[in-house]
Image (tube, helix red, strand yellow):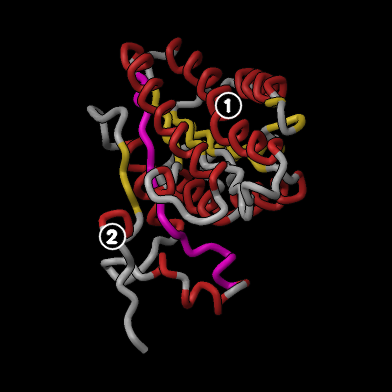
């Protein structure tokens, strides 16, 4: 039975990705920053998918803004090894959103925190997973990236820089790991209907990004299906990007209906 490791999988899109892989018969290992949320999610996943193995780890990306917690990554993979599991698919979903960071107001360490989480920490996870995939004859890595790697939005410079850098890293990994039969790809969601939609319906009713060419925005299952495509079907695809944003990236500006 194959095993997927999915980061940031206690809420929202991460839940949809876990449920997709579990429903397809994968054992699932997932991570979350809050130990309480990890325990709650693990209980819910095990009740819903009793036929597969579900393991949750409480792990954060950084010791402080400047320092990636490499030791926690090493301990997590060592524990996975001890359980006799091999990660066939690594899904890098966890991210620091870097919300509301203003260039003249936020300290440099806020920028560093986002870059270190979204780029350096993810590289650390890739390194440990790929080492094991190489020994087992192959595997695949999927980044959950963002269309903001190409289209900027206000007060998100660190996030946009991290997502652009992440795509460069994805291509470099795809090139260097291809000879080991390890594929590396990225899914680029746009706006996603998460719990933030329920918390602030007035804002999301008017936000320009919701006005897509197809008239809707993604739900978590849409992103999960794209991740699953790379993991299960894209045998001869590596270094590729799949945009899941209702067509937002192709338009010069959103066409907002007159009310």
Earlier sequence position, callout 1 versus callout 2:
1
For the C terminus, the quadrant is bottom left
Q: Magenta part of the protein: which range?
A: 182-198
Residue at 34% over, 53% down: 244
Q: Outermost residue, front direction?
A: 104
Relative to the observer, which residue lies in front, 28 or 71? 71
Structural crowding at the residue carrying mark 2, measured as other residues with C-alpha within 10 Å and reported as few (<14), some (14–19) or many (≥20): few
Point 51% across, 46% down: residue: 18
Is residue 247 rendered to the left or right of residue 47? left
Q: Is residue 155 above or below residue 127?
A: below
Magenta stretch holds residue 188: yes
Residue 73, located in which quarter of the rendered image? top right
Q: Which type of secondary structure does the marked residue at label 1 adopt?
A: helix
Residue lying at 54% horizontally and 52% vertically, measured from the top left:
15
Q: Which residue is mark 2?
A: 252
Residue 71 image offset from top left, x and y in percent: 71, 20
Q: Which residue is mark 1?
A: 120
How many numbered circles does the render carry?
A: 2
Whole-percent x, y for residue 89 in the image: 44, 31
Label pair 1/2, CB-CB below 8 angstroms: no
Q: Residue furthest left?
A: 236
Q: State the residue at coordinates (59%, 50%).
A: 45
Residue 132 in picture, x, y percent from top left? 50, 15
């Amino acid at each position: 039975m194959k095993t997927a490791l999915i980061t940031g999988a206690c809420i929202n899109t991460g839940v949809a990705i876990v449920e997709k892989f579990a429903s397809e018969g994968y054992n699932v290992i997932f991570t979350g920053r809050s130990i309480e949320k990890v325990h709650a999610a693990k209980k819910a996943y095990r009740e819903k998918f009793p036929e597969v193995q579900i393991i949750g780890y409480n792990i954060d990306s950084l010791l402080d803004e400047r320092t990636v917690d490499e030791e926690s990554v090493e301990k997590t993979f060592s524990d996975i090894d001890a359980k006799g599991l091999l990660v066939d698919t690594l899904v890098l979903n966890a991210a620091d959103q870097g919300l509301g960071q203003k260039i003249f107001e936020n300290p440099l360490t806020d920028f560093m925190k986002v870059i270190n989480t979204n780029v350096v920490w993810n590289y650390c996870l890739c390194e440990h997973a790929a080492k094991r995939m190489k020994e087992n004859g192959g595997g695949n890595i999927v980044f959950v990236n963002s269309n903001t790697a190409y289209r900027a939005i206000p007060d998100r410079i660190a996030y946009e820089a991290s997502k652009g850098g992440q795509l460069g890293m994805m291509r470099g990994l795809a090139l260097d790991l291809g000879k080991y039969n390890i594929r590396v790809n990225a899914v680029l969601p746009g706006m996603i209907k998460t719990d933030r939609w329920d918390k602030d319906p007035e804002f999301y009713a008017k936000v320009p990004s919701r006005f897509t060419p197809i008239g809707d925005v993604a739900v978590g299952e849409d992103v999960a299906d794209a991740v699953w495509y790379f993991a299960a079907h894209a045998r001869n695809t590596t270094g590729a990007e799949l945009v899941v944003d209702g067509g937002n990236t192709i338009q010069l500006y959103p066409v907002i209906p007159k009310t």
